[in-house]
Image (cartoon, rainbow, N blue to C red):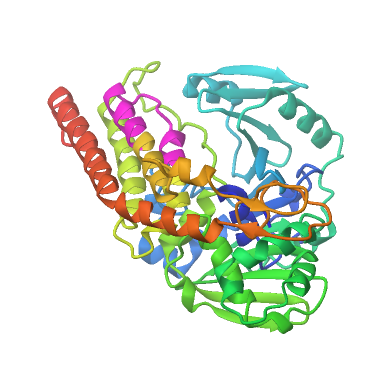
Amino acid sequence: MPRSAPVVWCLLLALAAPASAAGPYDGLLKYTPTSTNTLLLVDAKGAYASPLAKSEKWSEKGQPGNRGGLGFVPSDAEAVVVAADVNLNTLVRGCQVGLVTVGSLPNMRDVATREGGSSDDIVGQVAALSPRDVYFTWLPSTTLVAVYPADRQFTARYLKSALANKTGTLSPYLKKATEGAKDNTVTIAVDLEDAVDKTILKMALPTSPAVAKIKNADVNLLASFLSQVKGMTFSAKVTDKITASIAIEFAVEPARFRNTLPDLVRELIEDQGIAIEGFERWKPEFKDTTFTLSGSLTTADLKHIVSLFAFPNPAAEPEPGTTGATPTASATKRYLQAVNTILGEIAQKKDSPNYDKTATWHDKAADQLLHISPRNVDPVAIDAAHQSARRLRAIGQSLRGVPIDTKALAEQQYFYGYGGGRSFGWWGGAALFSNPVFVDTNIPKIREQMAKVVSDDKQHRAETWEMIDKTIYDAKRKLAEKYKVSF
């Protein structure tokens, strides 16, 4: 199985329940691109109506620009579908299409003005190009469309297909996943059929700690089994608490690998810098051709998971009396409140015992800072947020062992088979091998060295967090002096 933060998470989280083609997502699934292999479905209306959302005031916190509630999912949305086409060999994600059912559609030319971008006519549809690297447009039945990152050709071809009713054909696995999502608040599904190379797995699995600890593990049999994976689905239900599951479907019954599979899946997820509180306590279950891990989630962790598919929301309507892009104290204050929400949630991870497994969360927090609309926001606040985003990315890289000299360490890894080649983990990497007759690797040793570097860099990360705190504090002080109000 390939490696990558955003993509593998799609694969990881896309492990359990299906999503509904006969429920709240009906009107959106018909607009998914035919190349889709990864889906996110959010029952926003159900989420915000839940007892947990009411007790934690998600709707209040999820007002435009706040980034509370469910993060990028607006509190006035009814349902959200995000469809993506991920190259599962290189783990490069192309454009993702966000589809949101809203009560009423905004005027796209107004959206372009509020975004400080431009409006365009794309195959007869008015689209707003935002400087935040996203196209906003619409489709019938009050469907707001966001194409992220912005790609005009992709957007044009997608709209042509959607308007000609040539979208919405999902793979059998994704279709099955959508049919079971009506009872879920969040569903993430990934079609993995034909994505895994058995030969690479056979050579790479011996480097997995989960496999290495099993005496006389049959690597050939395990590789053959894993290569027949059909797909993964993550599902979460929000009531007065959040329960979740990650399920993987295979072509054959997985129970024979009950001593290996639970740790193998946890290892794959955590190696991508994705730490879930209490994940080690999630209960494994084997049933027919499906392996499932089930447990509870915190609100913050659910938001982190959903943030893997986040895209910018259209800027809200300007305040009465506001002209053009003139900065205002109120808009700047809301902007900094959103910044505080994002930084506050990721800051809770900095002292986690799993600090080395939170790299992806830091990366996504940086993305979210850049997604906040800067409309009528003072440049001092925008600069502070962007500086913070850069530092969060630096922390993420540190947690992966990249700063200092660990990039050189990573380049020393080797995994040789007959005919040569190199890989970076049991899930495969990009190297291809034919008829391998031997394996020689220093990956376990390199892992140990990189883990030490990550640990040794803890002080550097702490200092970077101090710089983030100081940057935001200084910005608030300057803005308070300028506008004579508290920030």
Q: Quadrant of residue 473?
A: top left
Residue stretch in magenta: 366-388
Taking depth in this image into account, of 416 and 258 the one nearest to the observer is 416
- Looking at the rendered structure, the number of numbered marks drawn on it comes to 0
Q: Quadrant of residue 197?
A: bottom right
Residue beneath the point at 64% across and 75% down: 261
In the image, 194: left or right of 342?
Answer: right
Residue beneath the point at 51% across and 46% down: 410
Residue beneath the point at 70% across and 55% down: 25
How far from the left and from the top, in percent, is residue 389?
38, 36
Q: Quadrant of the N terminus?
A: bottom right
Task: Tell me if residue 62 comes above or below residue 335 in the rendering.
Answer: below
Q: Is residue 365 visible?
A: no
Main secondary-structure element of the magenta-colored stretch = helix
Taking depth in this image into account, of 2 and 208 the one nearest to the observer is 208
Q: Is residue 68 visible?
A: yes
Q: Is residue 379 magenta?
A: yes
Taking depth in this image into account, of 128 and 231 the one nearest to the observer is 231
How far from the left and from the top, in percent, is residue 470?
19, 37
Q: Is residue 97 magenta?
A: no
Task: Tell me if residue 300 comes above or below residue 65 in the rendering.
Answer: below
In the image, 110: left or right of 288?
Answer: left
Q: Quadrant of residue 481?
A: top left
How far from the left and from the top, in percent, is residue 269?
55, 61
Task: Tell me if residue 269 comes above or below residue 135 in the rendering.
Answer: below
Q: Quadrant of the C terminus?
A: top left
In the image, 171: left or right of 125?
Answer: right
How far from the left and from the top, in percent, is residue 195?
77, 54
In the image, 388: left or right of 127?
Answer: left
